[in-house]
Image (tube, rainbow, N blue to C red):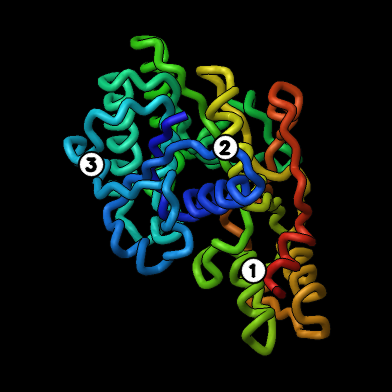
Amino acid sequence: MKLLVTGGTGFFGRALIRSWLKDESAGLKIPEVTIVTRSPSIFLERYPELCSNSWLTLHKSDLLEPESLPADCAFTHILHAATESTFGPQMQALQRYDDIVTGTRNILDYAVKNNVRRVLLTSSGGVYGPQPDGLQKIPESYLGIPDPLDPMSAYSIGKRAAEHLCSLYNDRFGLESTIARCFTFVGEDLPLKAHFAIGNFVYDALNNDCINVTGNGNPVRSYMHQSDLARWLLYILKKGIAGRAYNVGSDEGITISGLAHLVRDILSPGKAVVFEHRATSFQGRNIYVPDISLAKSELNLDVRISLKDSIAQFAT
């Protein structure tokens, strides 16, 4: 496999590189990987331990400038994971939508032009819109959508449009594209001071006097470890049925309150868990948990690392 990865310097990309490093240590064959990034020098400076590999090339490129993509590289596969999730909420809604849709269109055009056989788009569980309270696990067949009239839906609507582009390119050009609808994750590369609840809880447990929970703690989430994420993405890229979407995440739900207490019990027993704005009604998703039975039955994928073990790694 000769693989082009977009978004390879973000959380997903670092998860993939660490997975390949483990495979290499185990004597397994590693694909020839090229990661496109706006700033290879910054990535090299921040993560030198991830870059000194003969099978890895960093190529300076901007997906919004398709002429900057690698030329004449004969890639067999593309894993398109370039979406700003950590700092994306700080972007203007229109810019966020344009980045997702235009970047995906450019990658699909590049795949067709360069005869790339297979493409994986990392999408989001957000494409389903709010998960109904009575639906404990959301399947790929659920046809709910985000509110298209709400600018805050730019990320989710953009991902939905990107998925549709993949379908159109499958139909028009016979491109074998698959879709990974990704939910919520944890691991050593997760930012601990961003808008990710579990990252904030871990940071508080390790550094602050108490663990702060914004809201009433009732929303339900689930968490897949980044090594499972990497394994699933690569398998879906290679073996997923073209034109099909697969949920990627853990199907073991936990309330935000339960998560805060679990992080406390594992990393800082006895530390207080403090709830802020208890009386404030929650305005986001009450439930965000995937049904992963399709990936389990069709691709024989499984979740190998428990949430408890995922959290415990932060203590080492």
Q: CA distance from mark 3 to mark 1?
A: 38 Å
Quote the CA–CA distance across marks 3 and 2.
Answer: 32 Å
Q: Residue drawn 34% across and 11% down?
A: 173
From the image, tell me which residue sits under label 2: 29
**Left or right for 233, reference 288:** left
In the rendered structure, which disc, 3 or 1, sits on the residue that comes first in sequence?
Answer: 3
Question: Which residue is pictured at 47% across the width and 63% down the height?
Answer: 49
Check whether the beta carbons of the residues at disc 1 and disc 2 lie within 8 A of each other.
Answer: no
Mark 3 or 2, closer to the camera: 2
Q: x, y (%) of residue 278?
A: 68, 73
Between 288 and 44, the one nearer to me in the picture: 44
Q: Position of residue 223 (x, y in %)?
A: 68, 52
Number of numbered callouts drawn: 3
Horizontal side, residue 77 vs residue 188: left or right: left
Q: Amino acid at mark 3?
A: Leu
Identity of the residue drawn at 69% across and 85% down:
210
The answer to whether mark 3 and mark 1 are in CB contact below 8 A is no
Q: Amino acid at mark 2?
A: Lys
Query: Residue 284's spot in the image, x, y percent?
Result: 57, 54
Q: In the rendering, which numbered label is found on residue 64?
A: 3
Judged by depth in the image, the label closer to the viewer, 1 or 2, is 2
On screen, residue 72 versus residue 244, left or right, reads left
Query: Dot 1, crowdedness within 10 Å: few (<14), some or many (≥20)?
Result: some
- Residue 131, by quadrant, is top right
Q: Which residue is mark 1?
A: 215
Q: What crowding class fits label 2: few (fewer than 14 Cα within 10 Å), some (14-19), or many (20 or more)?
A: few
